[in-house]
Amino acid sequence: MGSRVEILNEGGFRSDGRRQYELREVTIDLSQQGQADGAAVITHGLTRVMVSVFGPREAKSRSQTIHDRANINVEVAISPFSAGERRKRSRGDKRILEMAATIKSTFEPVVQTTLYPRSQIDIFVQVLQQDGGLLQACINATTLALVNAGIPLLDFVCAVSGGVSSTSPMLDLTLLEENDLPNLTVAVMPKTGKSTLVTMETRLHVDRFEEIFKLVCSASQALHQEMKDAVRLRTMSLVTAMGTVQSNVGGDTMMDES
Amino acid sequence: MISLSKAEKSYIQAGILAQPPHRSDGRALHDFRTVALETGVAPLANGSARLTIGRSLRGGGGTEVLAATKLEVEDVKAGGVDGGRVVCSVTCSPAAYPHLSSGALEDLQYDMTTIVNQTLSHPSLHPSNLGIVKGQKSWLLNLDLIVLSDAGNVYDALFMAARAALWDTKVPRTRSIEYKAAAANRSTGGMEIDDASGLDTRQQPSIADFELHDFWDEGEPLEGREAWPVSVTLNLISPMYYLDASAQEEAATPLRLLLAFSFLPSGACLQGTRVLGIGELDAKTVKQGIEDGEKYAREVYTALNSKLKDEDVRRNQKASHRFARR
Amino acid sequence: MITFTSFPSTPAGEYDAVGHHHETDNEMEVDLDDDDLSSDGLRLTLPGDYLTSSQAFMRGHGTYVHEDQVVASVAGTVERVNKLITVRAIRTRYNPEVGDLVVGRITEVQPRRWKVDANSRQDAVLMLSSVNLPGGVQRRKLESDELQMRNFFEEGDLLVAEVQAFFSDGAMSLHTRSLKYGKLRNGQLVIIPPILVRRLKSHFITLPCGVDLILGLNGYIWVSRHIKASDQAGEEGFDAEAVYSNQNDDIDEPTRGAIARVANIIHVLAAHFVPLTDTILLEAYEWSVEQEEAHKGLFQEDIAEALVASLHSRS
């Protein structure tokens, strides 16, 4: 099916009307979800992922505690109706476990786990819709949910996918493009430019790799800006809500300052 | 379930039994929390709905369920059922039950799946338009429900969301085509769904297949969609009972009676019932419960129906608006 | 009765990046000092933001040092006390300090100690030696006490306690060695974000509607029937044997109504992120009685908005 559709036409447009280096529309919802300590819903085009974070909290079982830092537990669930063809994956499905392990290893160097010895941080990922770039959406939503839960991070982690169509590199692939092109996903800490994840399951020429890698890294800076704006907006609205009424009652609430 | 102290439990129970009764959030015994509903939330499904009970508009709290249907073509000879079948399954997000181990979570979603599937896949509710080619092909309707958050009364939420998603489901229009044995080559055209069905044309004089109508809408609704049931859960603190328990109230209530009703022009039909919790119920309570339950279920049914019709209107407007903008 | 509504078209907290350009031009950081000031001059910061030089300042909570710079690790407000820079996260679990008053729930009974959930990074510990036992405050602990620990507190029980100290791994230990502390009855629990509970002179609040409140700094709020002053700890009407009782007193109908109303008000204020103080609670309660709405009406969003708006205008 995919091969019949032109990935990049002569006018430089992709099948969904984007340019080569154009990212899909991003929406971010940071409002509270259920009982989670922090949550985020992100959409990249038609891909939609919700992440709920619980913790740091008491570990559910003793065997999961680590004496000098918090244990990060990631569980991924993919809604059976999220893709074109229904597919129900059980919790023990290899693909799901692999994705959870990838997310965990992406965030382990970023979350300041040593501040919470013997605790547990649960990251529950729920995939609601898929149209390519699943891993990038999971990682970006996890970053936002962790920030929203007040869990200390060295930096944001921003992930973007990229691929190459014959010789033209492209960013933020849809499912259609992902199926046809060699592609990779890179997660970057924008401040230092260090990447905490690079995955590629297809073949790609080494020379091309460097090109696309650099491109994806710089795209993550643009995404970083979007994510920061969303968090800033949310934080600002909460701080403002707390401030307006607090100032009404005057100084007697600030007893602890004395 | 969440844990409560004995004092909290008896505070809630005493409130229900008080004269007049007092619930911990001030509701009357038979009041529901606000229910929010939206259909058509999953673009890749044939029908879908998102439903919350008691969720704050600013986000957070409440019970939240996603429901979606997907239709698949099944070969009757390879495991399918002539005339189609309905299969329901419930998954619980660990975020809905953050204190449960994964084993306990599996058990819970198994229980929910059993109750929902047994009720909704019953022959008495079977939609008549799930067959494609008699004796050959039929639709498998998968209804998947996801519990995203549980703040009490999850079963009523599941049944309401299921009804909404099934109401929203569109079955693609199909047309049977038959090929005589002589012409039965593999060249059946681009719209064919299944060309490797293992049919042996020598034993059969003709084979049958179908093609999809290219039509302006996504298909027709499920036949008999009025009949999909709604449930009410009666939370029993003998001799009283109340509806739509919060998570705390559930933890303080030993027994719950789940009743699922269908409402047809010919009258109400009890489609499923389950006693949740440990304990015993005398026949009189059950009888009275079913009688009253029907009344409350009818209220839920009526309110849900008018909301579903509003949703249809809203989405038609949205669609025509989008069309006009082009 | 059942009513259906729709979801808000743009939920609070939704950020829509429409209109932002997605081209990958490598724009440089904007100067953060201007647009990060909230309305009352607080400075907002995000994880990874540089705050200041680590040579001149010390790093506190919510920050770390990277290449001689103090860097924020959480999203929140920057606070400076002399040379100490901290960033206070807005939504986070409870960060205990010694002397804090907390409300907690027993999760586990272990040899000579209870584990207590107090909305913190780990369950708190309540040692058998840190509670008052029935039959005299200064009584020695007996071996029989160890065997009947569930008679004092069992799984699920709620208690009010004070943070006593910390273990090396950061877990807090609690004590209930005051007559004000101990098991909770005659009411219901409301959970709100801990940042909305400010440190007050007293965290035991009595509202004139016959309702007592205990504002746990961990965000657990206990709303209960008022105990008459003559029956309170230390007075002659105080029943020392009832300290570990699971039985509620008889609660009359108006009091039940008032407790439900106060609990709903707290839910509404928390949903609007309004910090709790006795003054605000009182104003809100008066407002809701003035409106003569059935208290369940507070869950309806327009009434909740009106309540919060009236609080804003009252100052």
Image (tube, coloured by chain):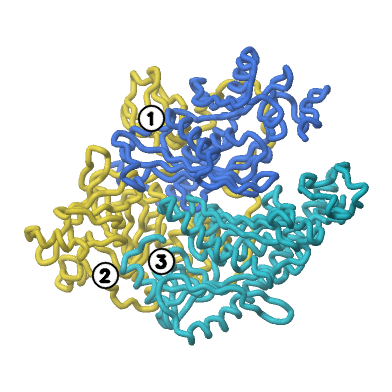
Chain colours: A blue, B cyan, C yellow
What type is the residue that disc 3 sits on?
Answer: Ala
Q: Nearer the viewer, residue A92 or C59?
A: A92
Estimate the x, y position of residue C3 in percent, counting from the top left: 61, 68
Tag 1's secondary structure?
strand
Which residue lies under the disc numbered 2? Answer: C246
Q: Which of the pair B273/B79 is nearer the observer?
A: B79
Question: What mark, if any, has residue C300 been given in the picture?
Answer: none
Dot 3 falls on a residue whose secondary structure is helix
Q: Which label is found at residue B251? A: 3
Q: What's the distance in space between the residues labelled 3 and 2, CA to CA?
A: 16 Å
The mark closer to the camera, 1 or 2, is 2
Q: Are marks 1 and 2 on the same chain?
A: yes
Q: Does residue A245 lie above or below A144 as drawn?
A: below
Instruction: Please identify the quarter of the rendering in which residue C121 is found.
Output: top left
Q: Residue at x 50, y 53 (%)?
A: A34
Residue A243 image point, x, y percent: 46, 45
Calculate the distance from the C-alpha at mark 1 to the C-alpha at mark 2: 44 Å
